[in-house]
Image (spheres, grey):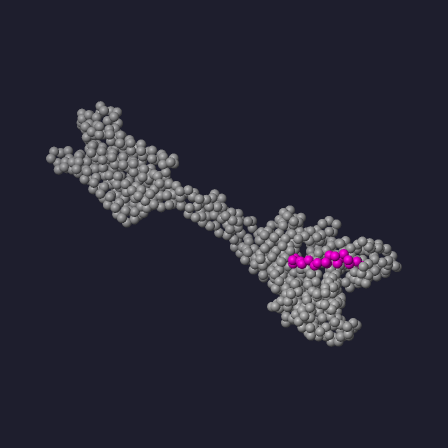
Amino acid sequence: MQPDCRYFVILRTYYMTILKCKQSGCDVQENDTFSLMFFKIYMLKHYQHFLTVQFAVDEINKDPQLLPNISLGYQLLNNFHESRLAVENSLMWLSGKGPTIPNYSCDRQHKSMVVIGGMSSTLSMAMATLLGLYKVPQLSYGSFDLLLSDEVLYPYVYQLGSRESTLHLAAVQLMLHFGWTWVGLIISYDLTGEQFFMHLKEEMAWNGLCLAFTEQVSEKIKDYDYYIKFLARILGSSSNVIFVYGNTDSLKYFSELLMIFEFYGKIFVISASWDFSAYSTDEMMSNFHGTLIFSHFKREIPGFTDFLKSVHPLANPEDIFLTSYWELAFNCLLSEVKNLNLTYRQCRESLTFADVPPIYFEKTIMELSSNIYNGVYLLAHTLHQMLQTEAKVLSEFLAYPLLSWKLLHFLKCINPVTGIKDALCGYGPSMTAETYDILNFRSFPDKIWSEVKVGEVIPHEKVLSINEEDIDWPEDFPQIPSSICSVVCGPGFRKQFREGQPICCFDCTSCPDGKISNKTDAEQCRQCPEDHYPSKEKDRCLPRTVTYLAYEETLGMILASSALCFSVLTTFVLGVFVMHRDTPIVKANNCSLSYILLISLTLCFLSSLLFIGRPTPAICILRQTTFAIVFTVAIASILAKTITVVVAFRATKPGSQLRRWLRPAVSHALIFLCTLIQMCLCSIWLGTYPPFLETDTHSEASFIVIECNEGSLVAFYCVLGYMGFLALVSFTLAFLARNLPDTFNEAKYLTFSMLVFCSVWISFLPTYQSTKGKAMVAMEIFSILVSSAGILICIFAPKCYVILLRPDRNTLQILKNKANP
C-alpha cells in the first residue's frame, strides 16, 4: 500500500537546508525566510497524515479478526506537493528502486497494490494519469473533485473525501437561522465551484435569499487591474457575510490576497476543505477570528490520543521523520551537532505532541487524516472480504500485485466507515448521509488559536442546532452580524420590490386600509374577515362590535327624546284646538283639517322612533312605509288647507259655484286620494324589491352596523319624489295666496312651513347619499323631526299664541276689523 507522505521528506530536506546554511554562513534573504517559514508551517501541520497511516496499519496488524495471517505494510514516497514530482515518484514506484524505466519493474519484493494520494485534486490527477495506464487503484484522500469522478478519464480513482453534495443545504440553513438574506459568494474557478454555485443559488432562491455578488478565484487576481476591481466588488457590497467555497489549492490566490489585505467588516463562512492556515502567518491568523467553518462530522478514532502520547523520538529512534519533525517543531536538537558556530538548546525529554503549537499540529483528527484512516481500513476490509469469499483471487493479487486493478470493484462495494459490504456496490461517499459540525475559529494572544464546535447541521433532515452564546464573532461585530439588503418590514407593512433588483432589496410600505400583515417581511397584506377589522398598527385583526343607532347611546337618546317631546307638544296643540274649537280663529282655519294635520304630525314624530333601536326585517319594512304614508297625510292636509283658502277667497260672491268645494268632504276626499296614491307606490315597492335587513362592514372600521337597506332605490326616491311634488304644489298655491286678507289668510304660514319642509328634504338628498351607517339613519331621523317641527311651528305657533296668550284677539269683531281695515 502506498500512502502519499510527501511531507516528511520535505521536512527533513528543510532541516538539512538550515543546517547547511548555518555551517556555510550563507545569507538568507527575506523572501527566502518567508518561503522556508511557509513550508515549515505547512508541512509540519500535515505530519498527522503520516501518524494516521502508522496508527491504522499497526492497529490492523494487531487485530486478530481482521486479515489473520496477513500483515499490511506501507512505502513512503515524496512529491514535494508538486505535480511533476508526483508523476516522477509514481514512475519510480512502478519501476522499483534505482532509475525510472517505464514498463519495467526492478524490485522483486514489490507487493504494493494500492496507492493512497494525493492531498489535492491536482496531485491526484497527475498521479492518476500515469497510474491509470497500469490500472493501479488510487485512493485520493483530498477534497472531492467532480473531474476525478469521471470514470472515463480516471477509471481507477476512488475518492475518499465527502462529495459535500448537501453543503449548499447546510449553508442555506445557517443563513435562515441568522436571517442572512444578502450574502456574498467566493468560489473556486473549477467544475466543483460551478456546481456548488448552481445548487446554492437554486436553494437560496427557493428560500427567498439572494447573492450580493459572486466571485471566482483564478489566476486573473495576479493582474493588478483585476485585483483592484475584485476587491472593489467585495468591499463595495453591503453584504457583511461572505461564503467561501473551494479547497486549499483552488483558493490559493485568494489566500495570497488575504496575506496582504484584510477584509474589515466582513465575516467568512467556509468549509473545512479550505485550510486558510496553509498560506497564513501567525499574525495573519487573527484576521480569521470569528470565522464559521463547516466541517464534516468527525468520527473519533479510538486510541489515537493514547498513540500520540506514546510517540516520541527517544521511543522511536529509527523514525527519521519524527526526529526531524520534533527538532523543527520545538526549535531544539535531540543530539549534539558539531562544527556549528551557533549553539542550539537540547530538546527536553518531557516534551510531547500536546506541547506542539497548534499551527504545527492539530490536536483533533483532521478531515484529511480521517480520510486516510478510512482508506487504510477500506483496503483492509476489502482484502478481508476477498479472503473469505474469493481466496483464489486474493492469492493472485498477492502473487501478482499489478493485477490489483481488480480490487477497485471490491473497494466500491465496501462501506469505508463501517467495513460492511454494500449489496448495491454504489459509490461510497455519495451513499453516505452527510452531517456537518459548525466550528468557530478563535484567535488569542500569544499566537494561540483554536476551532470550537458551536453547532451541528443535518442538511437532508433540515435540522440545525447551534449555541449562539458560544460563538466569538469578529471584533467588528459586537453582536450577531446582520447581512441584509433592506431593513426587515415589520408587521403592518409589506414588501414592495425595487424594479430591476433582487427580491431581497425592497421598500416597506404600509398596508392599505382594511388589510393587515401580522408577520415580518410580508409580501402581501391580507384582508381581515368581515367580522374583524385592522388594528391601528395594521398588524392584527380585532373582532368587530355589532352596533346600530341604539337608545342607550347619546345620539339615539337625543333623537328619541326630541321625537317624544315634539309628539307631546303636537298632542298638546291638538288638545288646545279641541278645547277652543268654538273660537273664531279655530273655525276660520277649517278645524277638521287642523285636527288631521296635528294627528299626522304626531305620527310623523313617533315614526322616527322606528329608526332607533336594533333593526329587524319587520321594522325595515314598516319604518319607511309608515314614514311615507303619515308624511303624505300631513302634506295632503296642508294642500287641502291651501286649496280651501284659495277657493274661499274666490267664492265670496253670492251664488258662486265654488262654495261647494268648501265642504269638509271635499278636503277629506283630497287627503284620501293623495294618501291612496302613496299607498299604491309603497305597495309596488314592497311587492318588487322591499327593504331588508343587512350588515354594513364598511362605514365604521371597528363596528358591524346593522341597518336596513331600502331595497329598490327607484321606489324609495319615487316615494320621496311624490311627497316633494305635493309639497311643491302646496308651496306654490300658498305663495300665490299670501296677500289675501288676514281674516282668511293662513297662506303665509303655509308658505313658510312648506319652505322649511322643502329646504330640509332638498338638503337631505345629497347628505343621504354621502353618509353611511348610523350617520345616515340619524340624518333621516333629523330630517323627519326638523321638517315636522317646521310645519308645527310655522302653522300653529301664531294660532296658539292668540288662543293662549291673547284671547282678547280671538273674537269675531277683531277678525272683521282685520278683514275691513
Residue pictured at 74% horizontal, 57% vertical: 306
Report the residue at 46% width, 48% height from top: 515
Residue found at the far left of this picture: 655
Q: What range of the chain is rendered magenta?
A: 295-313
Front residue of 265/42: it is: 42
Residue 120 at least partly seen: no
Q: Compared with residue 9, is residue 524 higher up or lower down, i.e. above or below? A: above
Q: Quadrant of residue 28?
A: bottom right
Give the percent coordinates (x, y) of residue 136.
70, 71
Quarter-of-image position of residue 313: bottom right
**Left or right: where 507 falls relative to 93:** left
- Picture coordinates of residue 102 (x, y %)? 74, 75
| 157 magenta-colored | no
Q: In this image, 158 relative to 484: left or right?
A: right
User: On the rendered structure, is 270 left or right of 317?
Assistant: left
Q: Is residue 312 magenta?
A: yes
Q: Residue at x 19, y 30 (%)?
A: 587
Q: Position of residue 427 (x, y in %)?
A: 62, 67
Residue in the foreground of this view, choosing between 541 and 427: 427
Quadrant where the C terminus lies? top left
Most foreground residue, 705 or 375: 375
Q: In terms of depth relative to the viewer, which is nearer, 120 or 596?
A: 120
Q: Answer yes or no: is residue 337 visible.
A: yes
Q: Quadrant of the N terminus?
A: bottom right
The residue most toward the top is 808
Residue 694 locus on image (x, y percent)? 35, 46
Residue 592 in the image: above or below residue 502: above
Q: Quadrant of residue 654?
A: top left
